[in-house]
Image (cartoon, rainbow, N blue to C red):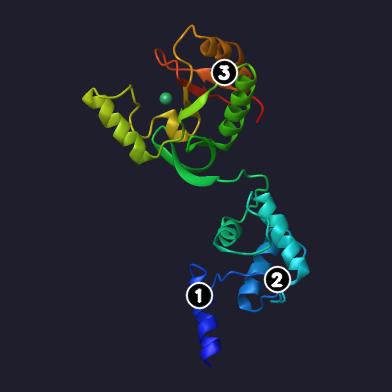
Amino acid sequence: MTTVSATRTQATSLSATSSQPTLRNGSKGAAVTQLQNLLRNKGYNISADGDFGPKTEAAVKKFQSSKGLVADGVVGPKTWAALKGGAVSNPGTPAGSKQVTAYVQGKPSTITVVPVGNGKYMRADAAKNFMAMQKAAKAAGINLTATSGFRSMEEQKVLYQKYLNGTGNLAAKPGYSNHQNGISMDIGGIGGYNTKAYNWLKNNAAKYGFKNDVAGEHWHWTYKGGGVA
Ligand SMILES: [Zn+2]
């Protein structure tokens, strides 16, 4: 009796909730059936028999790989979260992607943002193009860095207040910045207008859908669509 009780306690402490225990090859029970049903909903051809065998393990690994997770076949909190993260499967979403509340003309919507380095994020299509542009610039000897990408409402409010106080750069009214839509990036490493980096961007950014669209801000570039995405 004591052994069973100890095992149960450990199993619970390994996961956020008891309905989402850590599962692996050899696991059995209702949670396994739930896992198998989630995988089936994502198009994996396995039976929901509550028995975690090699087929379930292969499906888990494939799913983890499609989400940029470590493909170890062990279903922990990250894999559970990815499995429950919406009905629409989106294979190929880069690792570290997250859902955020974006704003366009004051209206909120949910978008997926992707890390672009320096702890910054951009909307998935903009991120893909920013990183491709960054790579091409690097090949030309120019080091472009992400200084400010997607901003939450709270972050924009802080910047707007600094602007009003005269202690910060021009900042759009909260809800109205392209940074809040995940399509604007303040790029570090440019150094001003008429620099090698600025001239490179002037000649190449359009290929990636980016435009320097705020007068007086050589660092502010906005993704306008198209490019390599
Ligand atoms: Zn900006």
Residue positioned most to the bottom: 1
- The residue wearing badge 2 is 25
- The residue wearing badge 1 is 12
Residue 141, picture quadrant? top right
Label 1 element class: helix
- The residue wearing badge 3 is 142
Q: Is residue 196 above or below residue 174?
A: above
Name the residue at 47% across, 42% down.
109
Amino acid type assigned to the residue bearing label 1 in the image:
Thr
Name the residue at 48% across, 72% down.
13
Q: Of marks 1 and 2, which one's residue comes earlier in the chain?
A: 1
Q: Of marks 2 and 3, which one's residue comes earlier in the chain?
A: 2
Amino acid type assigned to the residue bearing label 2 in the image:
Asn
Marks 3/1 in contact by CB < 8 Å: the verdict is: no
Q: Label 2, label 3: how many angstroms apart (C-alpha)?
A: 48 Å
Q: Is residue 200 above or below residue 84?
A: above
Amino acid type assigned to the residue bearing label 3 in the image:
Ile
Q: Label 3, label 1: how many angstroms apart (C-alpha)?
A: 51 Å
- Ligand 1 location (quadrant): top left
